[in-house]
Amino acid sequence: MRVERISRYPVKGLSPEYLEDVELAAGEGVPHDRRFAFAHADAPFDPADPKWLPKRHFACLAAHARVARVHSAYDPRSNTLLLRTEGAAPLAADLSDPAQREAAAAWMTALMGEEARGPMRFAEVPGHAFTDIPNKAVSLIGLASIAELGERAGMVLDPLRFRANLLFSGAAPFAELDWVGREILLGKARLRVFKRIVRCPATTVNPATAQRDAKPPLWLREHYGHADMGIYAEVLDGGTVAVGDGLELV
């Protein structure tokens, strides 16, 4: 088995950044993954006391297909976030400047239109990640699983619909679902698989068109009797993972 793609999603719900390698740390996810989010005005998120909240409190694909139109890029060296979409002026925000963080929130509020529940808030708290589950984890999916679901549904499915941190090849379709409780060696790191990923309406959104044109959760239930695609793993021993590295069950 082999690592084929490494991705992080600096802003919850927005576009990925592809990495050649990543340094994983014990107990943490991919660095800068889901580090930021755009919170709805009525979201009970308190930066002074950050707690995990369900995705409905933030701009996310599950509830707002239009966010797939946004291309984002984050430079951790300059702490700058770039946002762009067709039909709007691009925005480069220095996130060290409160005024520019507010400008980023206003940009997203304008994009969201009637779906925004009041002015959006730019959310970040050091050490907090706006992930879909409370645990800090790395998400993995076998490319064969995505390909087989697409074959059964009669549609080629872009792996980006499933927003994994790592895509790998070389395993049988859906073999990874049986790895819960097992440890894996991934490059120089060691991880323990602890949970299957239950897929949500975010996967119905075409990442290229921002249209809901597929039904992966329904297809999974129809063809496999569950809505699971991919796994979450916690990092036990940190280390570098690179595209092309092997993945080994232990």
Image (cartoon, rainbow, N blue to C red):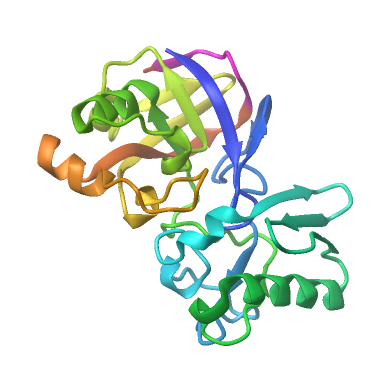
x then y, percent, for residue 173:
26, 21
In this view, 52 is above or below 232: below
Q: Nearer the viewer, residue 49 or 84?
A: 84
- Outermost residue on the front side: it is 87
Question: Was residue 40 drawn as part of the magenta stretch in this picture?
Answer: no
In this view, 217 is above or below 117: above
Decide if residue 72 is on the left or right side of residue 183: right
Question: Was residue 247 drawn as part of the magenta stretch in this picture?
Answer: yes
Q: Nearer the viewer, residue 211 or 180?
A: 211
Q: Would residue 13 be visible to someone looking at this image?
A: no
Quadrant in the picture for the N terminus: top left
The residue lying at 86 percent from left, 66 percent from top is 96
Residues in magenta, as a range = 240-248
In this view, 39 is above or below 76: below
The residue lying at 57 percent from left, 72 percent from top is 112
The residue lying at 85 percent from left, 78 percent from top is 99
Quadrant in the picture for the C terminus: top left
x then y, percent, for residue 235:
51, 37
x then y, percent, for residue 54:
41, 69
Q: How many marks?
A: 0
